[in-house]
Image: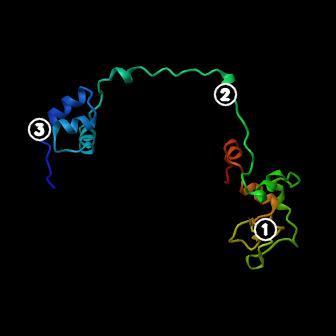
Amino acid sequence: MTVISWTDDRVEQLKKLWESGLSASQIAAELGNITRNAVIGKVHRLGLSGRAKSPSSAAPRQRKTRPAQNMMRISRPVSRGNTALAHVFETESEPDPVAFDNVVPMSQRRTLLELTEDTCHWPIGDPSSSEFFFCGGKAVASLPYCAHHSRVAYQPASERRRQQPKTTR
């Protein structure tokens, strides 16, 4: 691999080409035996700026306006083939997630060693704390969580996008 150094002539030619608005790829091709990235690096080291604006980039392009009646949102079905998950989203009798985590009955709570396929594996609390436990409620068939925690864990994409991120601090 041959290393081409930046001679004074090549630097002057780079400056002229840069000021005339050529792209880094075009300059590299013009100079020969040099990469686009080498051109970009040299431009930054020289502190070159104030490129001539090309006519296409001088004015922002106007976007077409669409009539509002042409844009219609159609809700999709919650589940496609996963009937266990569809049941979870349709169940509305479960309590609020924040309130539910604080009100798991003592008899329902499980340690890691007590979990089975039929119990909810939702962790509650800080794992390094002595009060840490798993929900232990009745798990929905073929899912690791109860109906309530499955709704929290498996939200449809459209609902996740609408919800604001929660701060944990």
Which class describes the residues within 10 Å of circle 3: few (<14), some (14-19), or many (20+)? few
Q: Name the residue under label 1.
A: 120
Could you tell which of marks 1 and 2 lies nearer the N-terminus? 2
- The image quadrant that residue 141 belongs to is bottom right
Which disc is residue 30 wearing? none
Left or right: 109 in relation to 81: right
Q: In this view, does 92 lie to the left or right of 145?
A: right
The percent coordinates of residue 106 (x first, y second) are: 87, 71
Choose the circle earlier in sequence order: 3 or 2: 3
Taking depth in this image into account, of 84 and 145 the one nearest to the observer is: 84
Residue at the spot of label 2: 71
Q: How many marks?
A: 3
Kindly identify the residue that appears in the image at 72 percent across and 36 percent down: 74
Give the numbered dot on residue 8: 3
From the viewer's side, name the closer residue of 146 and 127. 146
- Looking at the image, is mark 1 or mark 3 earlier in the sequence? 3
Q: Residue furthest front?
A: 81
* x and y percentages locating residue 110 in the rendered image: 80, 74
Image-quadrant location for residue 118: bottom right
Amino acid type, callout 3: Asp
Of helix, strand and loop, which one carries label 3? helix
Above or below 43: residue 140: below
Distance CA(mark 3)–CA(mark 2): 58 Å
Q: In terms of depth relative to the viewer, which is nearer, 68 or 40?
A: 68
Does the residue at mark 3 contact the one at mark 2 (Cβ under 8 Å)?
no
- x and y percentages locating residue 84 in the rendered image: 78, 59
What is the three-letter code of the residue carrying label 2?
Met
